[in-house]
């Protein structure tokens, strides 16, 4: 059509110089298919500013060039963004005891505390587990995994106990350790996992002779005088014959292997009578 064109944001022509454009357009054949794009290259780059966009324009997101990213500054604090518009984190919806959160506050992993009588084979630092130490008596140990060196640390739970306190008394005269007493043996307690434990044990005792001493020792074997655990001995001297004395001892942070601990007894002289014998162990760390 021979129209005057320019690619400037400002108009360099006066009205007299553009009269031809209006005449050409007016005289143009306006039937369907005869239109001419003005200018040929379409809208000039940068020609549309924010002020030229109608506030009610419903521009779809796909038409906006945001460089592939919407940053925090682009979002109004009052924006009501639907959950359906947020990218999924890959974590299945639900409630979890443990979650992992990245530096943007997004949950990237979730897990519930495990429960059972076998520790997880491939734990990660911070994992927790409820270990069933004694299902019969409901002894559950709450554990948390630290690392490959300190492994499972004890968070809470009741001691694991072995008790012989039914009121039945046992007597013995042996001056060396024995497990097989004349009335009732024991007690014993099974250590379920290798680790570091706090051990507690005690008993009531009377002796038929004055100034004699009875000793309760913890052993790793029920064979007489075999497997004494160093430091796990409790000596009691009632002084006067027939006098019953109650005593207990604590051994802190002792390394134990999985297996059974047996209480064995001996006396320096006379006949000893023992009742209410007990052993209790509480873990510090396991594995």
Image: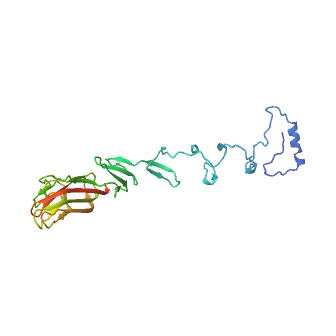
Q: Quick one: which residue is furthest to the front in this view?
A: 242
- Look at the image and tell me whether residue 85 can be seen: yes
Residue in view at x 87 percent, y 38 percent? 26
Q: Position of residue 176 (x, y in %)?
A: 11, 60
Location of residue 218 with respect to 133 vertically, above or below: below
Location of residue 54 with respect to 144 vertically, above or below: above
Is 86 or 237 nearer to us in this picture?
237
Residue 30 lies left or right of residue 238; in this view the side is: right
Q: Position of residue 114 (x, y in %)?
A: 38, 47
Considering the image in quadrants, where does the N terminus appear?
top right
Is 186 or 78 nearer to us in this picture?
186
Q: Where is residue 257 in the image (x, y as percent from the top left)?
A: 25, 55
Residue 118 lies left or right of residue 208; in this view the side is: right
| Quarter of the view holding residue 250 | bottom left
Residue in view at x 53 percent, y 45 percent? 88
Q: Where is residue 154 in the image (x, y as percent from the top left)?
A: 34, 56
Task: Give the colour scheme of this rendering.
Answer: rainbow
Considering the image in quadrants, where does the C terminus appear?
bottom left
């Amino acid at each position: 059509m021979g129209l005057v064109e320019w690619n400037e944001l400002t108009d360099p022509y006066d009205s007299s110089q553009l009269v031809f454009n209006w005449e050409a357009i007016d005289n143009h054949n306006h039937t369907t298919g005869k239109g001419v794009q003005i200018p040929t290259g379409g809208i000039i780059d940068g020609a549309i500013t924010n002020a030229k966009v109608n506030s009610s324009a419903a521009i779809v997101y796909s038409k906006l060039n945001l460089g592939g990213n919407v940053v925090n500054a682009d979002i109004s604090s009052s924006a009501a963004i639907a959950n359906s518009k947020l990218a999924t984190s890959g974590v299945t919806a639900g409630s979890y005891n443990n979650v992992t959160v990245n530096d943007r506050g997004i949950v990237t992993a979730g897990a519930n505390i495990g429960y059972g009588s076998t520790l997880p084979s491939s734990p990660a630092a911070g994992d927790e587990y409820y270990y069933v130490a004694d299902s019969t008596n409901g002894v559950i140990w709450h554990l948390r995994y630290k690392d490959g060196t300190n492994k499972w640390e004890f968070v809470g739970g009741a001691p694991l106990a072995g008790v012989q306190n039914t009121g039945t008394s046992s007597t013995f005269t042996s001056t060396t350790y024995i497990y097989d007493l004349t009335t009732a043996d024991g007690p014993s307690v099974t250590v379920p996992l290798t680790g570091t434990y706090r051990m507690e044990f005690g008993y009531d005792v009377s002796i038929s002779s004055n100034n004699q001493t009875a000793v309760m020792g913890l052993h790793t074997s029920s064979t007489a005088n075999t497997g004494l655990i160093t430091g796990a001995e409790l000596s009691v001297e009632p002084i006067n014959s027939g006098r019953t004395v109650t005593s207990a001892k604590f051994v802190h942070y002792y390394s134990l292997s999985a297996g059974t601990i047996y209480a064995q007894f001996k006396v320096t002289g006379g006949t000893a009578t023992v009742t209410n014998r007990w052993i209790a162990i509480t873990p510090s760390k396991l594995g």
